[in-house]
Image (spheres, rainbow, N blue to C red):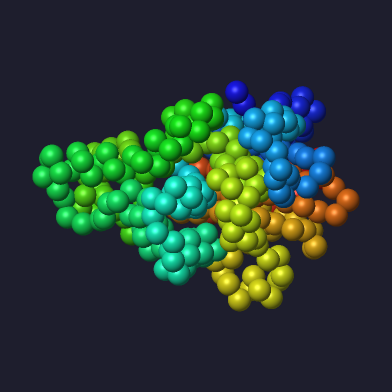
Amino acid sequence: MAFYSQDPAMGEALRQLIGRLEAEGRPGLGEQVSVTWLRYGDSLVGAAEGLGQEEFWGRMVSGASWAGPTLRYPASVVKLVYLVAAEAWLQRQLIEDGPELRRALADMVRDSGNDATSLVVDLLSGTTSGPSLPPERHAAWCRQRQLVNGWLARLGWSEVAGVNACQKTWAEGPYGRERDFYGAQLENRNRLSTDVTARVLHAVMAGAAVSPPACRRMTALLRRSLDLQARAADPENQVDGFLGAGLPEGARLWSKAGWMSQARHDAAYVEVEGRAPMLLVVFSEGRVRAADETLLPAIASALLDA
């Protein structure tokens, strides 16, 4: 069952926004973008604490989507999934906690570090990168790399159908056994939808993913500064060119962005004084969209005021 209910007024506002943005000089935008937009009456932060899972997930939130179930390559947004998986593994004592793991998780989320992500994926799956493997060993290695997908499937969420979160993220690309694992036509690339990404972030912000203490650790890593000086000092701040750049001064932002040559994405939860809190996930695909630094801020600004 879906975790949010479609609000007709929000859906119409989103449809009109996509049409306007397309008419302003973004031909084909409607096919290149997915959006999931949720709105809350009160702060979502810690909202699930003290509630049972059934009670929490039974409380439907209002929302709207544009191609929300469409599966797209998520770029570094997949690191949000790996973050939650790491906390789930820690809770079950499948991996050992320690300063190096915490450093890797922080670098993976705050700085979107690919080397840090590589370590996290290795720990989650019990695999390592390296040269190509003989067929039998490669098959066993591939089974191990599906552990995160198996965990996602066991959550029982309808939004998980077709999702693939088993690949590392790369600056230059995969080699050896990692390249073999992608498939000849890259058919085994990571795949997420804005709907499933929204549900993951919704659970984290509410304290419903793994445990409330785990969620507090994760939200601390997802918190972004909108301070202009801090952003200027960090060119890869995951705010400029993304949803956070469309927010007013004083907004509170938690987010995880993804960007590469063919994608510009962001998943964000936002609180602004005097306005309804919102959770917004936008995936945009294609080389032109990846270079468009104004699209995501424009969507965030318009929907915050809608």
- Where residue 123 sits, quadrant-wise, is bottom left
The quadrant of the image that shows the C terminus is top right
x, y (%) of residue 236? 55, 66
x, y (%) of residue 131? 17, 55
Q: Is residue 57 left or right of residue 77?
A: right
Q: Is residue 153 left or right of residue 233?
A: left
Between 281 and 119, the residue placed more toward the observer is: 119
Residue at 52% x, 59% y is: 109
Residue at 61% x, 76% y is: 233
| Number of marks | 0
The quadrant of the image that shows the N terminus is top right
Q: Is residue 26 above or below residue 95?
A: above
Asked if one can make out residue 200 in the rendered structure from this viewpoint, the answer is: yes
Between 286 and 52, the residue placed more toward the observer is: 52
Residue at 74% x, 58% y is: 252
Residue at 80% x, 63% y is: 249
Asked if one can make out residue 300 in the rendered structure from this viewpoint, the answer is: no
x, y (%) of residue 139? 19, 39
- Where residue 134 sits, quadrant-wise, is top left
Residue that lies at the very extreme toward the left in this rendered image: 134
Between 225 and 89, the residue placed more toward the observer is: 89
- Where residue 17 sits, quadrant-wise, is top right
Between 301 and 155, the residue placed more toward the observer is: 155
Residue that lies at the very extreme toward the right in this rendered image: 274
x, y (%) of residue 132? 16, 50
